[in-house]
Image (cartoon, rainbow, N blue to C red):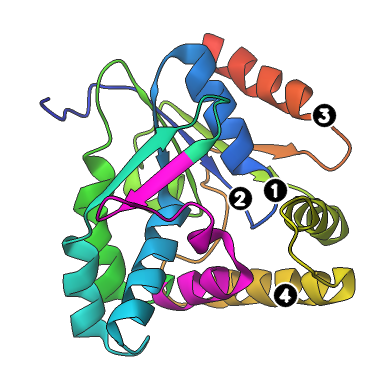
C-alpha cells in the first residue's frame, strides 16, 4: 500500500509505564486504524543484538540490524498484542526488564534511530495510524493530526508494572522497579538524541488516577475533533 502523509496519525508519547501501549491499542481498535508500538522495535533491536552477540555500543552493526529486522505485529484472540521476529513469537521475551534497559540504551544511538525511522513510517497506511512511543510526535510523525503526551507519577507506574509482571509469574521487587523507572526517565529525558519530552502542540494527559476506559475515551473524544 502506498504510504502518504495525507493519512492521519495519532501519536501517543510518554514515559515507561504511563499506559500508552494499552491506550494506543484500544484507540486503534475503536477507530479501526493500524497500530505501531515503536518501543517494541527498540526492544526487538536489543533482543536481536543480544542473540547475535552485537554490543550496544557497536552503532554500525546495530543500525544494519535495525534496518533489516523481519518483524510483524498482530493480536491474539483476546486482543492482546503479539510480536513476531523472524516468525518467532517474542512477545514475552521483549517485555522483560533486561530488554527494556537494552531498548533504552540502543534508542539513544542516532544510527539506530535512523535505521528504524523509515520502517516506522511504513506503518502509516489507510485509514489511519495510532503510534505510541517516546518521540512519535516530536521526531517520527511531526505532522500527526493529534499528539498526546500520556504520563503518570513514577509511583503509579511502578505499581502498574509490578502488577503486570506478577500476573505473568515473574518475581520482582516494587522498590527496584521504582528505581528502574526513575533511572530510565532520567536517561530518556537527558539523552542527546530525541529526548523524552512533549511536543509543543501535544495535549498532556495524566493517567495516574484515571481508569483505562476514561483515558481511552478522552483520546477518542480528542480524535473526534479532528
Which one is earlier in the sequence, the residue at label 4 or at label 3? Answer: 4
Magenta highlight on residue 50: no
Q: Find the magenta span and give its range.
A: 82-106
Disc number lying in front (2 or 1): 1
Instruction: Answer with mark 2 or mark 3, whichever residue precedes in sequence.
Output: 2
The residue that label 4 is drawn on is 180
Q: Which residue matches tag 1? A: 18
Residue drawn at the location 75% of the way across and 22% of the way down: 213
Query: What residue did someone put label 3 on?
Result: 211
Horizontal relation, residue 99 to residue 4: left or right: right
Seen in the picture, residue 124 relative to 216 is either above or below; the reply is: below
- What numbered label is drawn on residue 14? 2
| Identity of the residue drawn at 54% across and 9% down | 224
Separation of residues labelled 4 and 3 (CA atoms): 24 Å
> Gap in Å between the C-alphas at discs 1 and 4?
14 Å
Please rate how many residues cluster around mark 1, counting C-alpha atoms within 10 Å: few if below 14, some from 14 to 19, many from 20. many
Q: Residues at badges 2 and 1 in contact (C-beta under 8 Å)?
A: yes
Amino acid at each position: 500500500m502506498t504510504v502518504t502523509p495525507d493519512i492521519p496519525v495519532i501519536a501517543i508519547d510518554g514515559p515507561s509505564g504511563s499506559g500508552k501501549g494499552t491506550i494506543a491499542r484500544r484507540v486503534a481498535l475503536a477507530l479501526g486504524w493500524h497500530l505501531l508500538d515503536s518501543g517494541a522495535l527498540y526492544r526487538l533491536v536489543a533482543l536481536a543484538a543480544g542473540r547475535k552477540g552485537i554490543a550496544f555500543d557497536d552503532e554500525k552493526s546495530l543500525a544494519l540490524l535495525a534496518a533489516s529486522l523481519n518483524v510483524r505485529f498482530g493480536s491474539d484472540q483476546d486482543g492482546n498484542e503479539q510480536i513476531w521476529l523472524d516468525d518467532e513469537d517474542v512477545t514475552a521475551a521483549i517485555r522483560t526488564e533486561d530488554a527494556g534497559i537494552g531498548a533504552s540504551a540502543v534508542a539513544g544511538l542516532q544510527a539506530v534511530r535512523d535505521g528504524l525511522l523509515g520502517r516506522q513510517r511504513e506503518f502509516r497506511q489507510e485509514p489511519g495510524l495510532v503510534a505510541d512511543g517516546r518521540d512519535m510526535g516530536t521526531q517520527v510523525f511531526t505532522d500527526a493530526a493529534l499528539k498526546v503526551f500520556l504520563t503518570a507519577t513514577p509511583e503509579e507506574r511502578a505499581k502498574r508494572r509490578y502488577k503486570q509482571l506478577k500476573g505473568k509469574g515473574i518475581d520482582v521487587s516494587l522498590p527496584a522497579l521504582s528505581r528502574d523507572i526513575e533511572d530510565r526517565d532520567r536517561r530518556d529525558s537527558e539523552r542527546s538524541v530525541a529526548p523524552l519530552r512533549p511536543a509543543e502542540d501535544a495535549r498532556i494527559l495524566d493517567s495516574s488516577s484515571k481508569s483505562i476506559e476514561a483515558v481511552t475515551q478522552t483520546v477518542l473524544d480528542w480524535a473526534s475533533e479532528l
